[in-house]
Amino acid sequence: MDAQTPAGPSAADLQRAFQRALDLALAHAARGSDAPAFRRAHPDALGRLGDVPDRGRPLDEALAALIEDGLSPGMDTGHRRFFAFIPSPASPVSWLGEFAAAVHNRHAGSELQSQGVAAIERAVVRFLCDAAGYPQTSGGLFVSGGSTANLAGLCVARDQRLGEAKRSRGVVYLTRETHSSVAKALRILGFFDSQIRVVAIDGARRMDVAALAAAVTADRDAGRRPFAVVASAGTTNTGAVDPLSEIADLCGRENLWLHVDGAYGASALLSPAHRPLLAGIERADSLSWDAHKWLFQTYGCGMLLVRDRSLLAPSFALTSDYLRDGAAEGVEPNFWDLGPELTRPARAARLWLTLQTMGRDGMAAAIAHGFSLAQAAEKAVRATPGWIVVSPAQLAITAFRYAPAALSDEDADAANAQAARRLMEEGFAVVGTTRLDGRLSLRICAIHPQATAADMTATVKRLDELVRGIG
């Protein structure tokens, strides 16, 4: 073995390690449905990960431990039968784009430091703004994900609609189906629970616009300051889309900022057949969108889009002597002036590479495939005795539960939870659980481009076997 230097492994060691990592990556990309969707880590292996040696050990040995003990156990969110939460079936092209960006390690905060990276980010943001139906005044930036995008969008909403003097009286509106990251963002921004209104939902689990209007009127009459509404374009629970056009009408009349959390569902904008489901999103003042969900990117790749890009810098731009060398050279401000991060990785590179290789048509087909998968899952549930559909397929999500007449609701809840747990532990598939209408339901979010209708049928069949105690 080549000697290890104080600067790190030798060139030969690096070559062997990179080749090994490449071989494993390609094998991972080619894994079939027989690979487990979940694997529990061995406690001894987890313990070993905490050891830091006094003397460095061989790179190939450390790499093997990283992959086998650190990265392999847990939930494989990119598995074709991983249906819990919102999966992340990242394209191998996204891996490649992230790897290339990591190797060059460009600082994506200022254009002077990364001119090509800045051009890529602006181009992809423009593409996404166009897809959303935004005007040419729009813009945005890449962030770590929907949580940060929601935080940044609501920060701009606060600054544009409230200002400092009125913050203590500000009120924002959402529903119980709104993603928890929104409430967290509001807490970080200094708002109290008393300033957050949870608006009623309708029978389709969408924001009730009449209830919203009533809440705004009541708050104004009480001397409070309504300033923002957070609508959902694809809730995590059921894929419901709030009535965006009606909400936008109300926001226009009441001078309220409309932020749309489209972290998951906004990707439907890239499927021409399904874009009408999000009608009205083009009227949102700000929009969060995750590429590491339905755009098939690795984690840490989200976007914030705004109708008026000039509103970002007033909330985020600051000057310091040590930043003067990175001052923007053109008319566009640096990305570090448009969001909360100063140091930024080149997040847009991986999505740019994926879009370049898939093209508009390929991306549209991959997104449309998710709709058909959820419909196949719903069909399989309806064909299985004792099971009911709680929420029909929409935006690639359907929710259902085992609820035979012979079981009480409480016993059915327990049976559904146990079946989901056993399914995960055996590694065949992973489905999510949630509570809808007061009862525990199972939930499939199916967006993997390589998953099939047979995968949906097989998963429902295995759940049925487990819940009945067979196998």
Image (cartoon, grey):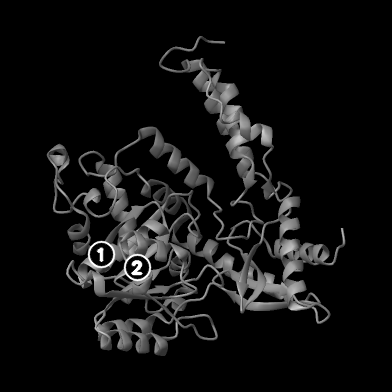
Question: With respect to residue 67, does 318 lie above or below?
Answer: below
Q: Position of residue 60 (x, y in %)?
A: 58, 22
Q: Which residue is mark 1?
A: 156
Residue 416 figure quarter: bottom right
For the residue marked with disc 2, what is the amino acid? Answer: Phe
Residue 439 figure quarter: bottom right
Question: Taking the image as drawn, is residue 461 in sight?
Answer: yes
Q: Position of residue 299 (x, y in %)?
A: 47, 49
317, 49: nearer the viewer: 49
Screen quadrant of the N terminus: top right
Question: With respect to residue 181, does 280 lie above or below?
Answer: below
Give the side of residue 340 with respect to residue 83, left or right: left
Give the side of residue 56 with respect to residue 323, left or right: right
Q: Is there CB contact under 8 Å for labels 2 and 1?
A: no
Q: Which residue is mark 2?
A: 192
**Helix, strand, or loop for circle 2?**
loop
Q: Residues within 10 Å of mark 1 (few under 14, many from 20)?
A: many
- For the view shown, which residue lies furthest in the right direction? 470
Screen quadrant of the C terminus: bottom right
**Helix, strand, or loop for circle 1?**
helix
Q: Position of residue 34 (x, y in %)?
A: 74, 48
Question: Taking the image as drawn, is residue 137 in sight?
Answer: no
Q: Residue at x 61, y 63 (%)?
A: 446
